[in-house]
Amino acid sequence: NAGVTQTPKFRVLKTGQSMTLLCAQDMNHEYMYWYRQDPGMGLRLIHYSVGEGTTAKGEVPDGYNVSRLKKQNFLLGLESAAPSQTSVYFCASSELKPTGPNQPQHFGDGTRLSIL
Amino acid sequence: SQQGEEDPQALSIQEGENATMNCSYKTSINNLQWYRQNSGRGLVHLILIRSNEREKHSGRLRVTLDTSKKSSSLLITASRAADTASYFCATDAFLTQGGSEKLVFGKGTKLTVNP
């Protein structure tokens, strides 16, 4: 049982390049999230999904796009990378329970992205 | 915008001592969660406390919640070097889509436990 797996673990891009970060979960969770973590800023939500085929904006969505074509996968895209997007990106998932959607989140180990 | 703020930002103690971290938040919540993050790793969920609960225990962890003061504390008793990590509180905040909710994380407390 792998939990939440993020690929790649590290990546260096040049300004203007594009790339896709992949998140896969094997827990059959309904909810999936993409965060970025910057020094002194905590975690900030980029986009999230409440189920297959759905996506929604979080706190800092500009410059990113997401897709959730399959329940187990959540992709984060950078169309034209900028140095301000240098960060550590975390994917998380959580299940939907009768007590409500805000259940404990399971995190991947992150993707460290540098934009030169 | 940050919903939760941890205090202190950093804490250094000796093995065997207790560590207390505090979290303050701004708006009403349904629940508050604490997470741990080891260096270079993702966050790991520790404990969830609901707004109608005042205290919760899990092993060496004790969490309290005071909704009147909008604050929570995490106590780690008999700390070990392996407890060295950053600790984050997270509170729920309502979004507009279908009544679903998200977590808003604080900036964390960096705990160092010296052997």
Image: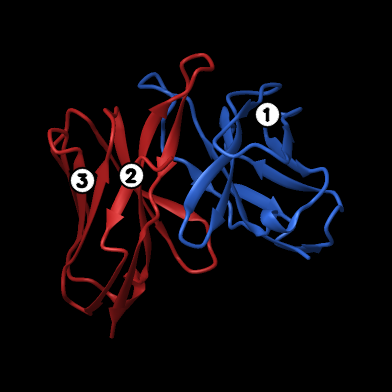
Chain colours: A blue, B red
Task: Assess disc 2: are there few (<14), some (14-19) or many (≥20) residues with their C-alpha within 10 Å of its C-alpha.
Answer: many
Q: Name the mark on residue B72.
A: 3
Locate residue A22, reporting x and y percent: 73, 46
Residue under the point 64% across and 37% down: A61
Sort mark 3 into few (<14), some (14-19) or many (20+) by Cα contacts within 10 Å. Answer: many
- CA gap between label 3 and label 2 equals 10 Å
Q: Quadrant of the C terminus of chain B?
A: bottom left
Q: Secondary structure at mark 2?
A: strand
- Residue A68 seen in the figure: yes
| CA gap, disc 1 and disc 3 | 34 Å
> Which type of secondary structure does the marked residue at label 1 adopt?
loop
Front residue of B27 and B17: B27
Q: Nearer the viewer, residue A73 or B23?
A: B23
Residue where numbered disc 1 is placed: A71
Q: Residue at x 20, y 45 (%)?
A: B72
Q: Is residue A93 above or below residue A3?
A: above
Amino acid carrying label 1: it is: Lys
